[in-house]
Amino acid sequence: MASSEIVLHHYPSSPFSEKIRVAFGIKRIAWRSVEIPNMMPKPDLMPLTGGYRKTPVMQIGADIYCDTQIILRELERRHPAPALFDGGLDYALAFWSDRLFFMPSVAVVFAEVGDMVPEAFRQDRAKMSGGTFSTDALKAAAPSARDQWRAHAGFVAETLADGRAFLTGNDPKAADIHAYMNVWWIKAAIPHVAPSLLAEFSALEAWSGRMAAFGHGNPAPMDSKEALAIAKSARTEAREAEDPFGQLQPGDKVRVAADDYGRDPVAGTVIFADAREIAIRRSAPETGEVAVHFPRAGFTVTKA
């Protein structure tokens, strides 16, 4: 396999992975699929990321991209047509989708299926969030969560009410991908409940069908050990660069962590850092030297 091929580390039911899979579909990208566990431990992912445990992770050779924000940015750079982004606010919209819209989705989904998930999964998600996983609390919060979910879904439905095919016009864009994630997850995770939630939003239902029709591009399965071997045989494309407007410079030792949940820090030395992205150099016996890329928005960086 060429080290320039795209490898996505994900699992089928991951809503954040669906963002990337749909982007592959819209852009008609061929990619390699490494299916990872939906909870810790993730023994063949940790050597690549250095501790980042969220899903998905994209790998291109020895370059590892953590978080859908930076994954979508890199996909747009490497595969610019058809374009998904018209400007920076398209990236900002992800914070609405991933946090304000997603949290009611979590409550709605697990109020329905929380009693059926394994205890190990509950403990994993409690540790990931820094809180608890209480199905009783989720069930108690479900009526309010449904109201919140309907409110956010209503924003999307109102935008589609004039008959447009997609949120910004005739072609799918990042706004559609961000909004679709939560609708897709509700339909996939609780299909017995989704019709009642979507009943008042006929335009939303039709739009989600158009989004689903793009598919997932052209995936081919890959074993996780092969992905590790690819990283070890490749060299990062990241190049050292100084940031004249920032405090982080090549060679600085840092720790990078998400600022919401799954805050496991990743340690390394700065390759480059700017307003959009930070790439750090780290190594593991299984991978050799890799560059791990994070977005700056939504992540904290502290000097080690």
Image (cartoon, grey):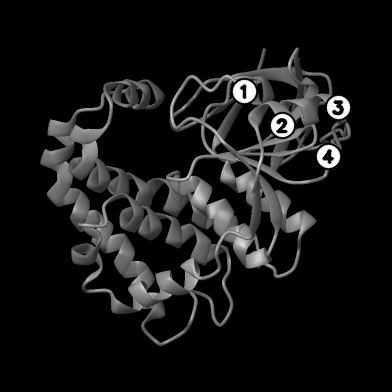
Determine which residue is flagged by label 1.
Answer: 44
- Residue at image point 51% right, 32% down: 54
Q: Which amino acid does label 1 sit on?
A: Asp
Distance between the alpha carbons at the discs numbered 4 and 3: 8 Å
For the point 34% across and 78% down, the residue is: 203
Query: SS at mark 1?
Result: loop
Under tag 2, what secondary structure?
A: helix
Q: Is residue 260 left or right of residue 279?
A: left
Residue 227 image label? 2
Q: Residues within 10 Å of mark 1 (few under 14, many from 20)?
A: some
Amino acid type of the residue that numbered disc 3 sits on in the rendered structure: Ser
Q: Where is residue 227 in the image (x, y as percent from the top left)?
A: 71, 31
Could you say whether the residue bearing mark 4 is in a helix, strand or loop? Answer: loop
Secondary structure category for the residue under label 3: helix
Find disc 4 in the rendering and name its residue: 3
Q: Residues under labels 3 and 2: Cα distance?
A: 10 Å
Q: Which amino acid does label 4 sit on?
A: Ser
Q: Are marks 1 and 2 in contact (CB under 8 Å)?
A: yes
**Lateral position of residue 289 relative to residue 105, left or right:** right
